[in-house]
């Protein structure tokens, strides 16, 4: 809108130049009804005299209209180009016959061409302006320089094209954009825009330059239809284009990573529709790529998993729906982790996590090997405990930190102590204190403590013990891998079998 005002003001300024002092002179004649009699025409004070195609004389108002120097004598091409914004289009050659060219933006004003022998006289003729119009014209003259400077300082290119897509006006930023790619401002626009459609406003992206992706200058152009053609506003979007390229490259990198990820990934948007999945999800769930490409919602995907027996079978459908609602709520709060034991014998770990923009992400991980290994390890550990519990010797194992990590049933019977009932871990210091109170005095208790807490190389040794209310024992102390210590208490058969 401001540009249209600027154009109108420019024309008004031109007209003001040839109106001169006559239009502003106080009227001496009596006031007449404007509707009854048209205002009289003003005498032409803006005239050009041409001989051939060269201007040989012009009035001061005419020189001011075209902003020409006092000693300049323009030719017809220069004169035509200067008058085109006001009275265009003018013929390519000076007219040979009388002609009249109406002003483009102001009614009641025309350019009269009148041949005079070998010369041609051009005069701007206009009707007398009412006082209100004169006042408004004076106000516009004050505003015009400010608007012109504002348009010249606008950092984005602005230009006007006519119905034939020819450039009829442009600002300084448009000249700079043309200079970036070596284009001529008065020539065809360097912006490759789509042909205008039936809309009055259209938006398009275009790039200047064609010497490679790095040499392009990207712009978003907004085009607005007006009565003289189209007004175009271009905004540089190089930073946006770089950001989009980086984002696209990042997504491609993530896609390649997701493609090789053994964990199935399903990301749902804020509407709970599938937005992203990887090939591992197809392999783990057995769902088809065609089904996943339709972007099913979360309930439909879990229904498909239930029908394909790829999740534990619920007791009834109603409880299943209630359970699924709880799953969605837990995943949205980053609290959902479940282990699914499938009828096929596989075991899946399902993890739900909140996703940006109120989305939800589910991870499907096959942990069958991990579960199988854990179960086998527990079975072997239980067997080892059973073997140690079957021994007659009391066995105790202390860690490298001096804490009791294991003992068998014979140990509990011998010392009357069950470490499993203790809240805190039994230390080697506490254990030796209990043993010392149940046995006759012996110097080995301090040695056992030092051995269990020592970080140096150690060698197995043994020593005799005598319980106060029990048999004679032999205590064997052995180092174990990882800095642990093994103690075995066995009945000393030599003392039992010795003759009384």
Image (cartoon, rainbow, N blue to C red):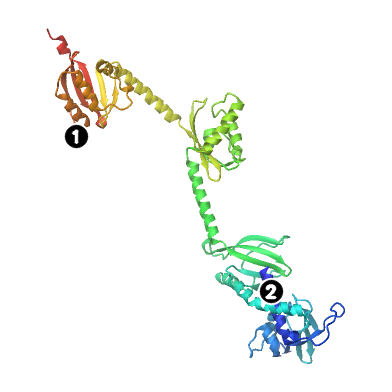
User: Mark 2 = which residue?
Assistant: 7
**Residue 167, position in %: x, y?**
66, 72
Farthest top residue in view: 500
Q: Quadrant of residue 168?
A: bottom right
Kindly state the secondary structure of the residue where label 1 is placed: loop
Asked if one can make out residue 25 in the rendered structure from this viewpoint, the answer is: yes
Report crowding for label 1: few under 14, some 14 to 19, many 20 or more residues within 10 A (C-alpha): few
**Callouts 2 and 1 close, C-beta under 8 Å:** no
108 shown above or below 295: below
Mark nearer the N terminus (2 vs 1): 2
Report which quarter residue 20 is drawn in.
Answer: bottom right
Which of these two is toward me, 351 or 404? 404
Q: Which residue is drawn at 72% across and 67% down?
A: 226
User: Which residue ends up furthest to the right in the rendered image?
Assistant: 36
Q: Which of 252 and 101 is in front in this view?
A: 101
x%, y% of residue 150?
A: 60, 72
Describe the element under mark 2 as helix, strand or loop: helix
State the residue position of label 1.
456
Q: Is residue 103 left or right of residue 264?
A: right
Q: Where is residue 353 in the image (x, y as percent from the top left)?
A: 50, 39
Nearer to the camera, 13 or 141: 141
Q: Nearer the viewer, mark 2 or mark 1?
A: 2
Direction from residue 390 to residue 73 in the image, left or right? right
């Amino acid at each position: 809108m401001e540009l249209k005002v600027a154009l109108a003001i420019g024309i008004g300024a031109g007209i003001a130049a040839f109106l001169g002092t006559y239009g502003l002179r106080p009227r001496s004649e009596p006031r007449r009804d404007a509707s009854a009699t048209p205002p009289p025409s003003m005498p032409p004070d803006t005239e050009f005299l041409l001989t051939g195609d060269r201007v040989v004389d012009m009035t001061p108002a005419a020189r001011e209209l075209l902003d020409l120097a006092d000693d300049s004598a323009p030719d017809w091409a220069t004169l035509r180009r200067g008058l085109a914004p006001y009275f265009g289009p003018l013929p390519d050659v000076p007219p040979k016959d009388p002609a009249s060219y109406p002003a483009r933006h102001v009614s009641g004003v025309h350019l009269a061409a009148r041949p005079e022998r070998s010369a041609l006289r051009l005069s701007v003729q206009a009707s007398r302006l009412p006082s209100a119009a004169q006042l408004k014209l004076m106000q516009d003259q004050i505003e015009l320089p400010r608007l012109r400077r504002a348009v010249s300082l606008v950092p984005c290119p602005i230009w006007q094209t006519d119905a034939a897509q020819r450039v009829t006006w442009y600002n300084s930023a448009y000249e700079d954009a043309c200079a970036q790619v070596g284009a001529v401002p008065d020539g065809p626009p360097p912006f490759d825009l789509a042909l205008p459609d039936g809309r009055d406003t259209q938006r398009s992206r275009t790039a200047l330059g064609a010497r490679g992706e790095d040499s392009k200058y990207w712009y978003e152009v907004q085009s607005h239809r007006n009565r003289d053609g189209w007004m175009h506003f271009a905004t540089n979007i190089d930073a946006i284009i770089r950001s989009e390229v980086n984002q696209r490259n990042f997504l491609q990198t993530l896609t390649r990573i997701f493609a090789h990820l053994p964990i199935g990934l399903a990301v749902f948007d804020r509407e709970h529709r599938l937005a992203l999945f990887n090939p591992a999800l197809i392999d783990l769930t057995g769902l088809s790529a065609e089904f996943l490409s339709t972007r099913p919602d979360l309930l439909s995907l879990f229904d498909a998993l239930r029908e394909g027996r790829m999740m534990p079978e619920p007791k009834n459908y109603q409880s299943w729906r209630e359970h699924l609602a709880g799953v969605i709520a837990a995943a949205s709060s980053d609290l959902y982790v479940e282990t699914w034991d499938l009828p096929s014998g596989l075991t899946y770990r399902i993890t739900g996590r909140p996703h940006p923009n109120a989305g939800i992400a589910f991870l499907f991980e096959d942990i069958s090997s991990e579960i199988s290994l854990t179960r086998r390890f527990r079975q072997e550990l239980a067997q080892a405990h059973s073997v140690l519990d079957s021994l007659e010797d009391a066995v105790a194992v202390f860690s490298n930190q001096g804490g009791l990590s294991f003992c068998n049933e014979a140990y509990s019977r011998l010392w009357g102590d069950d470490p499993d009932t203790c809240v805190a871990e039994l230390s080697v210091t506490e254990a030796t204190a209990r043993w010392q109170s149940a046995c006759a005095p012996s110097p080995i208790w301090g040695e056992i403590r030092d051995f269990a807490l020592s970080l140096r190389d150690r060698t197995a040794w043994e020593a005799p013990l005598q319980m106060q209310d029990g048999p004679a024992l032999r205590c064997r102390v052995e180092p174990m891998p990882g800095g642990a210590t093994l103690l075995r208490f066995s009945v000393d058969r030599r003392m039992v079998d010795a003759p009384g």
